[in-house]
Image (spheres, rainbow, N blue to C red):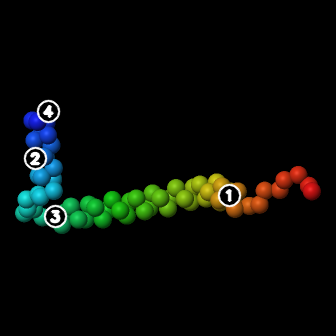
Amino acid sequence: MNALKFILLIAACSLLFPRNAYGYIDPGTGSYVFQILIAAFVALSFAVKVYWHKIRKFVGGLFSKKKDAPQ
């Protein structure tokens, strides 16, 4: 049990106090991330366009007053 606590302590210390990686992000990676963001925006826009009537009906149903039995 003491060995497990020691291992967890070492793991926690290594996560809390990381060393420098001295790495960099090259321009190819940056452009790839930018391309993914643009593709996600276009896909979301297309999905909203395709399902616009269903989305509008759902939101309208949330905010409409429900008519109960006449009083």
Q: Disc 2 marks which amino acid? A: Ile
Q: Which residue is drawn at 49% across and 61% down?
A: 45
Say above or below: 54 vs 6: below
**Residue placed under numbered mark 1 in the picture:** 62
Q: Residue at x 30, y 65 (%)?
A: 34
Q: Residue 36 carries which label?
A: none
Q: Disc 4 marks which amino acid? A: Met
Secondary structure of residue under mark 4? loop
**Residue 44 point in image, percent of width and height:** 47, 58
Viewer-nearest of discs 4 and 2: 4
**Residue placed under numbered mark 4 in the picture:** 1
The Cα–Cα distance between marks 3 and 2, rounded to whole angstroms, is: 29 Å
The Cα–Cα distance between marks 1 and 4, rounded to whole angstroms, is: 55 Å
**Residue 59 point in image, percent of width and height:** 65, 59
Q: Residue 25 carries which label?
A: 3
Residue 53 visible from this viewpoint: no
Secondary structure of residue under mark 2? helix
Say above or below: 14 vs 42: above
Viewer-nearest of discs 1 and 4: 4
Q: Disc 3 marks which amino acid? A: Ile
Q: Which mark is residue 10?
A: 2
Q: Residues within 10 Å of mark 3 (few under 14, many from 20)?
A: few
Q: Disc 1 marks which amino acid? A: Leu
Labels 1 and 2: the sequence-earlier one = 2
Q: Residues within 10 Å of mark 2 (few under 14, many from 20)?
A: few
